[in-house]
Image (cartoon, grey):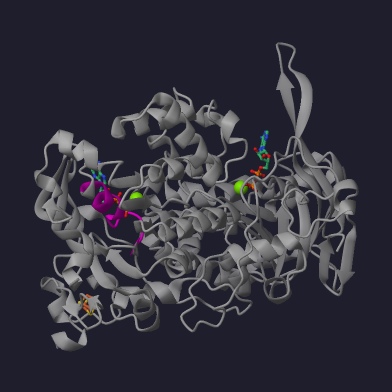
Amino acid sequence: MGFRDLKLLEVKNITVTFETDEGIVKAVDDVSFHINRNEIVGLVGESGCGKSVTALSILRLIPLPYGRIETGEILFYGKNLLELNRKEMRKIRGRAISMIFQELGSALSPLHTIGRQMVETILMHKNITRKDAWNIAETWLEKVQISDPRERMFAYPYQLSGGMQQRVMIAMALMLGPDIIIADEPTTALDVTIQAQVFELVREMRRSHTSILLITHDMGVIWEMCDRVLVMYASRVVEEGNRDDIFSKPTHPYTIALLESIPKLSADKGRLKAIPGQVPSALNYPSGCHFFDRCPDAFDRCRDEKPKLIDLGNGHKAACFLTKNEL
Amino acid sequence: MDTKQHVFLRKMNCKQPKKSSLLEAYDLQTWFPIKRGILARTVGYVRAVDIASLYINKGETLGLVGESGCGKTTLGRTLLGLEKARRGKILFCGKNLLELNRSELRKIRRRMQIIFQDPLTALNPRMNIIDIITEGLVEFRLIEGTREDHAKRLMNEVGLDEEAIYRYPHEFSGGQRQRINIARALSLRPDLIICDEPVSALDVSVQAQVINLLMDLRDRYNLSYLFISHDLSVVSNIAHRVAVMYLGWIVEHGPTGDIINNPMHPYTKALINAVPRPDPNKIEHKRERIILKGEIPSSSDPPSGCMFHTRCPEVMNICRERAPLETKSGMHGVWCHL
Ligand SMILES: Nc1ncnc2c1ncn2[C@@H]1O[C@H](COP(=O)(O)OP(=O)(O)O)[C@@H](O)[C@H]1O
Ligand SMILES: Nc1ncnc2c1ncn2[C@@H]1O[C@H](COP(=O)(O)OP(=O)(O)O)[C@@H](O)[C@H]1O
Ligand code: SF4
Ligand SMILES: [Mg+2]
Ligand SMILES: [Mg+2]
């Protein structure tokens, strides 16, 4: 089997825009990446950099008509998802690619019991009896360590804590045996000891050969969970590589600065290395490199020209004019 | 700050006997009644703070960590007198705050300020920056010279452009708004600032700027902080000592190094273990994962005995029956039967 065959999902040159009252927002700008079979890919970046929009565009959940995927292809098993009709797309969602959303509210309906929602979802994709679907759902609640799964099937979402709702969503994302799970900040709203429980589950998922796109703003989470990393800044991917490469030889000035600015768990005190300025608004990203106004190494060329991702070998890429092969 | 005002404020400060704490609190307890029915009968209590003792020395930062709902905010508000303690003692410069009359309390209030997590909701959107950051000075009649001078000086101190004093909160970014809050807290030259999750709502790249600012101000003015956060990494970076809270109890406290490197309480151990952290040199490669079972119990129906016994990996019979007492060694204290 050649290297290409390993690619389960390939996102090619996706650009997504939104029409807003203040003007056109380019939320995702020419983003490309792939997910291999059996791999956890991390997508990391600060709020507003385009992580969620990237995820939503894979499942074609960008809110119409304001939002538009302007260009690009999303190849899943070699088929372009952007060319499927609604019915075909609905089959992909949930069954082949499922999503765990950042906001707990957006995926579970407050009107129906957990059990009913799970059973309906199963029946949408599988031709089995209601009773069998019920049993499958209950088994999954048990697998994600929900106590008293039999009773919880009759509970409404508001009766469960945040941690439990998140585990129900994980069960729902898993129960149809998808090829890929897109998890958008699945633990950001949870406490660390509950996060640790959820990650234990995610590790088990991987054992069942599911690929995962894990979105987070936390570099610690990336280190603990991911095989490969995409670093996003202001709508663009600025660096990509194996986890170890990204952490031991970060190359893009943003990745370097980000890693240095994180407070470490240690008793050593002293000033942190902060990144000056703030994340630019999507309405006026710099015209050249988007990191230009905050970059300690910026020079003239960075002002007007957009750097492309340069291959550094071993799948490690960075989009900066200072990158070795670029100079 | 001009010297006249400085001297004036200094005079108001208590003379402190050496080595005594700025703030001491003993066995604080703050419960919220749960009311039911048309008669609003009290049917139970949320035990937000159940047993909490702490002290903060002049110029020192005490970090307060714990997961959401464990009572951190309530403890901070209780220390400020914004929530009423049903039990306990709060000594500020040796005076028991729970026994002071209103005018005495008002004077002391000036010296204890608070910074909240969400910088926007803490700022009145209809007030411009000059009004926001000099409001307290006017109230306490501490204005000498013009309000503009005061406002500009404060803006400089927190690293904002002094020309921006006539702007409104919505014109600033999250990090800048938090600086405005800090300027406001600073305006009255407090001795103690309670920082309640001051960087939790900020972007990673902006967090470090605000943490640095807080550390600079602390060193410049010998400020004391109670630094509340759910993020142990942030706390370990700024705090000299750390107190760990679980379900209304402070279960362990000590110098930051002792807490991070030699935690004694099983909850502290699990909390530290659960912090995801980059480890490119693979020093901790074989860190064994401690995964706590189950959820945090409700603080309206807390477990008997030790609060942590329902999730504790090292639970013994006695833990279910009797609440542990404090075991101290040096400055490190822990509430556990082990
Ligand atoms: N429905 C929408 N309408 C207009 N702008 C949007 C919409 N959704 C996202 N955006 C904009 O797109 C950019 C990227 O957003 P998002 O992908 O949610 O960021 P992240 O998930 O990285 O925090 C932001 O500037 C955001 O304001
Ligand atoms: N005003 C209030 N009335 C009733 N319950 C409250 C009130 N404020 C806080 N609580 C409860 O007290 C407990 C502790 O809350 P809080 O101090 O906000 O915790 P933390 O800041 O650690 O997240 C929680 O269970 C919370 O729901
Ligand atoms: S291209 Fe220029 S501005 Fe952008 S990261 Fe590289 S050096 Fe900095
Ligand atoms: Mg998002
Ligand atoms: Mg709080």
Say whether residue A49 is magenta. Answer: yes
Stretch in magenta: A43-57
Task: Tell me where residue A96 appears, x and y as whole percent.
Answer: 27, 46
Residue A31: quadrant of the picture: bottom left
- Along the line of sight, the residue nearer the viewer: B38 or B10: B38
Task: Tell me where residue A239 appears, x and y as whole percent.
Answer: 26, 72
- Along the line of sight, the residue nearer the viewer: A220 or A257: A220
- Along the line of sight, the residue nearer the viewer: A92 or B278: A92
Question: What residue appears at the point 65 percent right and 51 percent down from the top-left corner?
Answer: B293
Above or below, B125 relative to A293: above
Question: What residue appears at the point 66 percent right and 58 percent down from the top-left corner?
Answer: B65
Task: Tell me where residue A225 appears, x and y as whole percent.
Answer: 44, 65
Judge left or right: residue A73 versus residue B226.
left
Above or below, B191 relative to B78: below
**Which quarter of the figure is the N terminus of chain B placed in?**
bottom right
- Along the line of sight, the residue nearer the viewer: B223 or B174: B174
Task: Tell me where residue B40 appears, x and y as whole percent.
Answer: 73, 17
Residue A61 in view in this figure: no
Question: What residue appears at the point 47 percent right and 41 percent down from the top-left corner?
Answer: B124
Say whether residue B1 is magenta. Answer: no
